[in-house]
Image (cartoon, grey):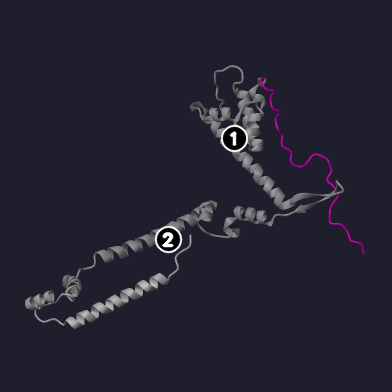
C-alpha cells in the first residue's frame, strides 16, 4: 500500500471568496471630482457632511462620504484617509469640530461595520481553518488547513455565554445580554442582602448595653498591672544601692529584696537568650 499525501492541490489563482473593494487613492494635490451622492452608503451610515471654508486640499462632502464608506469596508482609519488623499489628523480634526456631530456618529457606526467584518473573518477561519501552503523545491505543491480550537471556543462562548462560557462570573453577567442583565440584578440583590446583614450585626454590637461595673473593674485591673510593673522597675534599680533600699523600707515597710534580685537576673537571662537567638538568624541577602 502506498502512502497518500494529505495535502490538497495548490489553490487556483482565481478571485478569492472574500473581496474588499478599496477606492483608489487620489493623486497627491488633486481634488476628488464628482457628486457626493454618487458614493452610496447604507441608511445607518448617512450623515450631514461638515462644510468648511477652504481652498485646495479641503475635505469636501464627497471625501467625507468616501472616508465613511472605506472605513465601513475595512475598519481602518488610515486606509480610509488614504483613499481620499488626506491625512488621518485632518479627519480627526473634522470629527472633533462642534459641527461634526453627525460625521462623528457615522464614524462610530462605520467602525461597528468594520468590527462586524472582523468577526465574520474569525468565523470563517474557525470553520474553514487557516491555509498553510506547502512548497517543494521552491514550487507550491499544495495546502493544508490549520484549525484553531481556542478561537472556536472563544466564538462559541461569546455567542452563547450562558450555555458555553467557561466562567459564570461578573464579566459574563455584565456582557451577557438580557440574561446577563438578569444575573446582574440577582447579584445586586444578593450583595444588598449581605450588606444589610453586616450592617445589622454592627448596629447590634454598637447598641449593646454596657456593663459599667465590668468596665470599671477592667480599668482598675489594668491600672494595677501597670503600677506593679512600674514598681518592679523602680525597685530593681535600688538593688545595688543599700541606702535606697533602707530608705524605701523606712517609708513602705520590709521588702523581699532577694526575690526581686532573682526576678531581675531571670529577666536579664531571658533578654540575653533572645538576643543570641536573633544573632543566629541569617541576614537577608541583597
Relative to 56, is 248 on the left or the right? left
Q: Secondary structure at mark 1?
A: helix
Q: Secondary structure at mark 2?
A: helix
Residue closer to the observer: 262 or 76: 262
Instruction: List x then y, in percent, for residue 173.
Output: 51, 55
Residue closer to the observer: 213 or 166: 213
- Mark on residue 190? 2
Q: Residue at coordinates 39% horizontally, 73% vertically from top-left?
A: 277
Q: Residue at coordinates 78% horizontally, 50% vertically from top-left?
A: 132
Q: Main secondary structure of the magenta part?
A: loop
Instruction: List x then y, in percent, for residue 188.
Output: 43, 56
Q: Residues within 10 Å of mark 2 (few under 14, many from 20)?
A: few
163 to 224, vertically: above or below: above
Q: Residue at coordinates 39% horizontally, 62% vertically from top-left?
A: 194
Relative to 130, is 257 on the left or the right? left
Observer-side mark, 1 or 2, equals 2
- Mark on residue 113? none
Find the magenta span and give its range: 1-29
Amino acid at each position: 500500500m502506498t502512502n497518500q499525501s494529505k495535502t490538497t492541490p495548490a489553490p487556483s489563482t482565481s478571485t478569492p471568496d472574500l473581496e474588499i473593494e478599496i477606492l483608489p487613492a487620489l493623486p497627491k494635490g488633486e481634488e476628488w471630482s464628482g457628486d457626493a451622492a454618487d458614493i452610496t452608503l447604507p441608511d445607518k451610515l448617512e450623515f450631514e457632511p461638515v462644510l468648511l471654508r477652504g481652498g485646495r486640499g479641503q475635505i469636501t462632502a464627497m471625501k467625507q462620504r468616501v472616508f465613511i464608506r472605506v472605513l465601513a469596508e475595512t475598519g481602518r482609519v488610515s486606509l480610509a484617509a488614504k483613499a481620499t488623499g488626506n491625512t488621518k489628523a485632518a479627519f480627526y480634526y473634522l470629527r472633533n469640530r462642534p459641527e461634526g456631530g453627525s460625521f462623528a456618529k457615522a464614524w462610530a457606526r462605520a467602525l461597528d461595520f468594520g468590527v462586524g467584518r472582523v468577526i465574520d473573518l474569525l468565523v470563517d477561519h474557525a470553520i474553514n481553518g487557516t491555509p498553510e501552503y506547502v512548497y517543494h523545491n521552491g514550487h507550491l505543491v499544495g495546502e493544508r488547513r490549520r484549525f484553531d480550537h481556542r478561537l472556536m471556543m472563544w466564538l462559541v462562548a461569546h455567542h452563547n455565554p450562558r450555555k458555553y462560557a467557561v466562567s459564570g462570573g461578573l464579566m459574563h453577567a455584565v456582557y451577557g445580554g438580557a440574561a446577563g442583565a438578569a444575573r446582574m440584578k440577582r447579584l445586586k440583590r444578593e450583595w444588598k442582602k449581605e450588606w444589610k446583614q453586616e450592617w445589622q450585626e454592627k448596629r447590634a454590637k454598637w447598641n449593646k448595653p454596657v456593663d459599667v461595673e465590668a468596665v470599671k473593674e477592667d480599668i482598675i485591673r489594668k491600672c494595677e498591672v501597670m503600677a506593679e510593673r512600674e514598681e518592679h522597675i523602680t525597685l530593681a534599680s535600688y538593688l545595688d544601692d543599700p541606702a535606697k533600699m533602707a530608705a524605701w523600707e523606712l517609708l513602705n515597710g520590709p521588702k523581699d529584696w532577694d526575690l526581686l534580685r532573682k526576678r531581675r537576673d531571670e529577666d536579664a537571662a531571658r533578654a540575653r537568650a533572645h538576643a543570641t537567638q536573633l544573632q543566629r538568624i541569617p541576614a537577608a541577602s541583597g
